Image: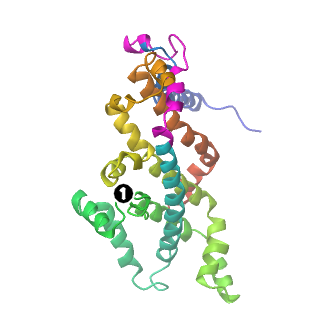
Amino acid sequence: MVGQASLSRTLFQIVNNSFLFLFSLLAILPFVNVLALSLSNKTAAAAGLVKLWPVGFTWNSYKFVFLRDELFTALGISVERVVLGTAISMLLTILVAYPLSKEESAFPGRTLYAWLFVFTILFNGGLIPWYMTIKMTGILDTIWALVLPGAVQVFNCILLLNFFRGLPKALEEAAFVDGASHWTIIWRIFVPLSAPALATVTLFTIVGHWNSWFDGLILMNSPTHYPLQSYLQTVVVKLDTSAFANIDPVQAKLLSEISDRTVKAAQIFMASVPILLIYPFLQKYFMAGIVLGSVKE
């Protein structure tokens, strides 16, 4: 029979849960404020009256956003970036992590290669060489400029190779005895057994691509090629009203009923929804992948 929890244990749980609750509020309340702001009228938003509940409830900001093509063009580019970037990054991460997870006897030079990857975490060539390299490859102002330069994330490789090293060696040895090649072992044994780590790395990759905005500003020559976060950055910094010169009467009426603050809030909230819908399905793997792939004897 399990005894009752001690007083110190009970106090620890109360303090710990209170601490986590407060930090959860710090993360959630700004998001709630943005949602409330996007649903408020322009007078209340301009006066700073909106906190956690809409003041003068209205859908006008969302109606205006849905009538504009720019947001959905940028959204399509971001979706394309996430799909291509995640697929390429996961493929390369697996192909890097597998050989680096071997012992030096099985893969001579493994330590040297591993340190070369780690070196890129500690040092980089700087912004200008990075930009010039991408420009010289001829992929500037294309989707590949957003996908290929960051295709191999060393932190993800380290996480995955540590997980691979924790898998029973007997499985690999038995597969070799049965005539399996390294390629077969990767896709038939290592990948299926590494679902928690792969889900974690996939989540990191998706969030990284979705939230990235700086490379879009630097590598795209035309605003029409901006991914969503780069587009939102230009909107949040300064709403470009010159783009509204040739709008139709419906948009003109909505424009008179909204403010730049409510439109910004509506676009920010809409940009956050996709990642919030994906995260719950991968969250159950998140902690398991981090813990299982990080500590080795």
The answer to which image quadrant residue 280 occupies is: top right
Residue 114 position within the rendered picture, expressed as x and y whole percent measured from the top left: 39, 73
Q: Can residue 192 be seen in this snapshot?
A: yes
Q: In this view, does 152 lie above or below 76?
A: below
Q: Is mark 1 on a helix, strand or loop?
A: loop
Residue 52 position within the rendered picture, expressed as x and y whole percent measured from the top left: 50, 17
The answer to which image quadrant residue 139 occupies is: bottom left
Magenta includes 98? no
Which residues lie in the magenta part? Answer: 43-72
Residue 54 position within the rendered picture, expressed as x and y whole percent measured from the top left: 52, 15
Q: Is residue 63 above or below residue 213?
A: above
Residue at 77 percent across and 39 percent down: it is 1
Residue at 47 percent across and 14 percent down: it is 41
Residue at 46 percent across and 60 percent down: it is 156
Q: Nearer the viewer, residue 96 or 58?
A: 58
Q: Nearer the viewer, residue 113 or 234?
A: 234
Residue identifier under label 1: 141
Magenta includes 55? yes
Say whether residue 143 is left or right of residue 8.
Answer: left
Q: Nearer the viewer, residue 119 or 206?
A: 206
Q: Is residue 219 above or below residue 75?
A: below
Residue at 43 percent across and 16 percent down: it is 256
